[in-house]
Amino acid sequence: MNLTTHAAAAIGAARTITRVQRWTAPSIATVSLVVAAQLVLVAGPLFLSPNVVERLTTLFIYGILALMWNALAGYAGLLSVGHQAFFGLGAYAAVRLADWGVSPYPALLLAATLVGALSLPISAFMLRLRDGEFAIGMWVVAALCHLLVNLDNLVQGETGTSLIALQAYAADARRSYTYWAALGTVTALGWLVFVMLRGKMGTAAQAIRDNEEAAGSVGVRVLPSKRLIFVLSAFGCAAAGALWLASSITFQPKTYFSVQWTAYMIFMVLVGGIGTYEGPILGAVLFFTIETLFGASGVTYLIGLGATALLFALLMPRGIWGEIEQRLGLQLLPVGYRLRGGTGGPPPKR
Amino acid sequence: MIWLNQLVQGLMLGGYYALLACGLSFMFGVMGIINLAHGSLAVLAAYMLFVLAERFEVHPLLGLVAVIPVMALIGWVLHRLVLERSARAGALIPLLSTFGLASVLDNSMFQAFGADTRSLAPYIDSLSYDGWTLPGGIIVGQLAVLTLVVAIALLGGLHLMLNHTALGRRIRAAAHDPDTAQLVGVDARSVYAASTAIAMTTVAIAGAFLAMRATFDPYTGPYQLIFAFEAVIIGGRSLWGTLMGGIVLGVAQSIGAQVHPQGFLIAGHVVFLAVLLARVYAADTLRRWVRSVRSRFSSQFGNRATTP
């Protein structure tokens, strides 16, 4: 027997023991449930009370923010504390376009697209920065965007303005349209990220996050991959800002360009589970619940959010879903592969 | 003459930014950590001095004698409880934890002191408004000159400490290669804790000057962090570079304010991004230029230069 036969036999044996698996019974059930729930939610405005419809719209916007920030930090390893720049610019662009006569709802989509396009030149130099420098560099970009938006007379400085064009719709219709727009955006972005992470892009992004130089050396196109995720996250955050404007009508630069949005995104992603697909969704739901219960207690609530984020960073950096996944080997929305069987093979890996 | 005046005032302002940035630059240099709570900690020191001045009528500069040790202790605890643990978990976790800390600090200060803007200017007598007149009628404030002098003294002190003391040697060793430093008997852990304490000492002094020269409120911290960071990056991340960076930032803001009412902050951010852009692309262009010169050189002198 020569070596080659040995190797072939070994590979054959391994093949019978280990199976590479993506779908499991719980994950198939979950994906079906998610699709069913999304279909039910489409009919939401028909049977839910106006208040619930408004709250759900808020939840969807939080979901978009968490998904986008996680794609950036959890998968591309780019931690930004300045994504309120795109949130604010999205809202501003919608106000600006509506003032020029674009119908308000198309203006929301157009605004997000324009901000996504603007993020391309921004990415050209911001992506040259690493880690902490990128993080605060983005904060400077956000501060600059805020100041430049204030120069537009339409905004009237910190007094702000409103999306008056929305008054053309009756309150009920407006509520439903905004709800559908938010639901459509969070669903579309959610599935887009899901499909992206399951493809080549996901593997590339995680390789970059784990070790940029090593990823580059095995042929991952580091910069284009990062740029794609950066632009996607800018588009998503801009859409979230535009939708927030549609649901609250008033545009005050200070509120939209506030670093508080980043604090919310960090909270949702860190508590839910950074770098997992399910984590930020769980985080958004948790944050939404906490806000509903304690949001009225003002500054104490904000201290609590900051302290929770700090404790999670120190004690449970994988977040709630990361821990669940690690301990139970559970994957409900599978974006990775898992190895099944074998003699105590490696743990399920994304 | 008005432009010369703005230039001089910008230079003085740069002294404050250098003072603010030197702790951030020091921690980044030694541990590779960017402390996102830097500005909030400076505001915390300012509030401590404010309480001392308001309740106990302690002059802010005298108050520093009490506040500096407290801030140094906070720095030591900060490293032991937060930074050390997060640094072990990867490059991103220190950013998340210090961001959370900043949020806790800002909102806690809001709860304790309310939204009122405060200043230490009323407690330092004529120092807040006295000035010297330079030839040409340019007036420089005594406090601004003092800030610049303190900034230079502090940076010089850090420089001397790093290069001429046993602690400085240990810090440089741990900064360069913590594992090897450990092998030759340097306890990187306590060196880092000491460095954080030293950085917080400078933050206490920066907080004092922040509160003496201007007003502050619980949410002033993040802006100070941004200014400090801009100074560090413009200056190229070294200690003396930080002084240069602070001055460039100060002059840009001062001239920007002259150009447009909102120009003060915009000019600062724009100069920061321009320096960043220039550094990224100038480095590329320079490399390309060197390569083209080298290839021209080798074609002129045959293949000798290109043989490996």
Image (spheres, rainbow, N blue to C red):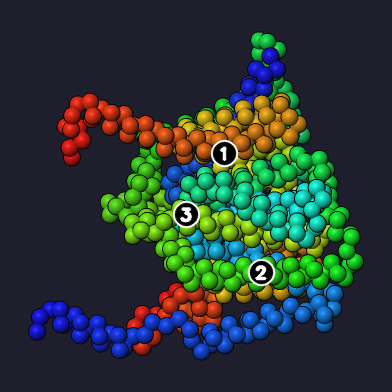
- Is B189 or B291 nearer to us in this picture? B291
Q: Is residue A63 above or below residue B179?
A: below
Identify which amino acid the numbered label 3 is placed on. Answer: Pro
Image coordinates of residue A326 in percent, x first then y, are 47, 78
Q: Secondary structure at mark 3?
A: helix
- Residue at 54% of width from left, 86% of height from top? A28
Q: Are marks 2 and 1 in contact (CB under 8 Å)?
A: no
- Residue at 74% of width from left, 50% of height from top? A92
- Tell whether A70 sits left or right of B261: left
Quadrant in which the N terminus of chain B is drawn? top right
Residue located beneath label 1 in the image: B273
Q: Is residue B108 visible?
A: no
Chain identity of mark 3: A
Image coordinates of residue A221 in percent, x first then y, are 41, 56
Q: Which mark is residue A224?
A: 3
Q: Which mark is first along the chain, 2 or 3?
A: 2
Chain identity of mark 2: A
Identify which amino acid the numbered label 2 is placed on. Answer: Val
What distance separates the C-alpha of mark 2 from that of mark 1? 33 Å
- Tell whether B195 sits left or right of B45: left
Mark 2 is surrounded, within 10 Å at the Cα level, by few (under 14), some (14 to 19) or many (20 or more) other residues, namely many
Q: Is residue B4 visible?
A: yes
Q: Within the image, what quadrant is residue A203 found in?
A: bottom left
Please determine if labels 2 and 1 lie on a single subunit: no
Identify which amino acid the numbered label 1 is placed on. Answer: Leu
- Is B43 or A245 nearer to us in this picture? A245
Chain identity of mark 1: B
- Residue at 47% of width from left, 39% of height from top? B280
- Tell whether B101 sits left or right of A322: right
Q: Secondary structure at mark 1?
A: helix
Residue located beneath label 2 in the image: A186
